[in-house]
Image (cartoon, rainbow, N blue to C red):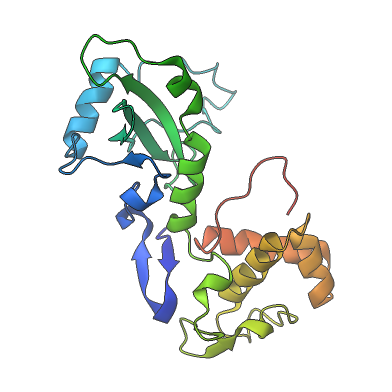
């Protein structure tokens, strides 16, 4: 299975080739040292080994012996970031979320944190422990990782779709049509869903069903397919739409 992201102009990129963290993902006041302190995946593996990161206990396997539903520890990567004012350094371990025995296709989450003071042996200030902007960093990473981010993709009110056709911003909220007959159908699904989310719609998928006059289950299938194609970030458990 090959998950790809689509970019304006029809370009695409493999999920695994998209950097997990870039400087632009960090909030103001945080930077990535250049050159990076953890310069290679091999060094990340060494940190995991030193911490015995993968030496954890799983719940008892089910009757079939499988541990379905748990993230594998493979493919995580450590990055060092630094707070400009306090010089506090933080090692973040980032990993794309996926189920065991499946290919990575989910959102990127922080899966480990190590704090380091400016000077070796100094205490780490407690406010820094509380105020590390983990949720903002994760949100910025995933906005960049996934294709559709709203109206900012439209230049001059139009967007060139992967098929080459030109789509106008005002057409995003029209009925979606037939998946087999509409070019770039799932790209448009992603655009419409994202527009509704940006507009504050509580249940965007239900609204999409209303717009296209289809059963809710049909719209849910469209959105799920768009997520599998990498055109939308994964849905959060317990959250409508």
- Residue 132, compared with residue 8, is above or below; it is above
Residue at 37% in and 75% down = 11
Res 106 visible: no
Nearest the viewer among 179 and 129 is 129
Horizontal side of 158 relative to 209 (left or right) equals left
Give the image location of residue 119, x and y in percent.
Answer: 21, 17
Residue at 74% in and 82% down = 174
Tell me which corner region of the image, top left, top right, bottom left or bottom right, holds residue 33. top left
Give the image location of residue 60, x and y in percent.
Answer: 55, 16
Nearest the viewer among 160 and 25 is 25
Counting every numbered tag in the picture gives 0
Tell me which corner region of the image, top left, top right, bottom left or bottom right, holds residue 56. top left
Quarter of the image with the C terminus is: bottom right
- Residue 121, compared with residue 187, is above or below; it is above
Res 45 visible: yes
Give the image location of residue 179, x and y in percent.
Answer: 65, 78
């Amino acid at each position: 299975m090959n998950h790809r992201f689509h970019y304006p102009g029809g370009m695409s990129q493999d999920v695994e080739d998209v950097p997990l963290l870039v400087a632009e993902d960090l909030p103001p006041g945080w930077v990535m040292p250049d050159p990076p302190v953890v310069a290679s995946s091999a060094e990340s593996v060494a940190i995991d080994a030193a911490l015995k990161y993968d030496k954890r206990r799983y719940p008892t396997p089910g009757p079939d012996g499988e541990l379905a539903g748990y993230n594998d520890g493979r493919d995580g990567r450590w990055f060092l970031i630094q707070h400009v004012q306090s010089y506090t350094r933080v090692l973040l371990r980032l990993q794309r979320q996926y189920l065991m025995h499946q290919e990575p296709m989910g959102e990127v989450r922080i899966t480990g944190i190590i704090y380091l003071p400016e000077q070796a042996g100094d205490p780490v200030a407690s406010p820094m422990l509380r105020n590390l902007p983990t949720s903002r960093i994760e949100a910025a990473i995933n906005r960049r990782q996934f294709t559709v981010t709203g109206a900012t993709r439209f230049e001059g009110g139009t967007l060139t779709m992967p098929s080459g056709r030109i789509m106008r911003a005002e057409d995003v909220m029209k009925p979606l049509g037939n998946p087999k007959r509409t070019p770039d159908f799932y790209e448009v699904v992603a655009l419409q869903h994202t527009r509704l989310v940006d507009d504050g719609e509580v249940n965007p998928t239900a609204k999409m069903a209303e717009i296209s006059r289809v059963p809710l289950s049909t719209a849910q299938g469209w959105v799920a397919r768009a997520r599998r194609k990498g055109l939308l970030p994964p849905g959060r458990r317990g959250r409508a739409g």
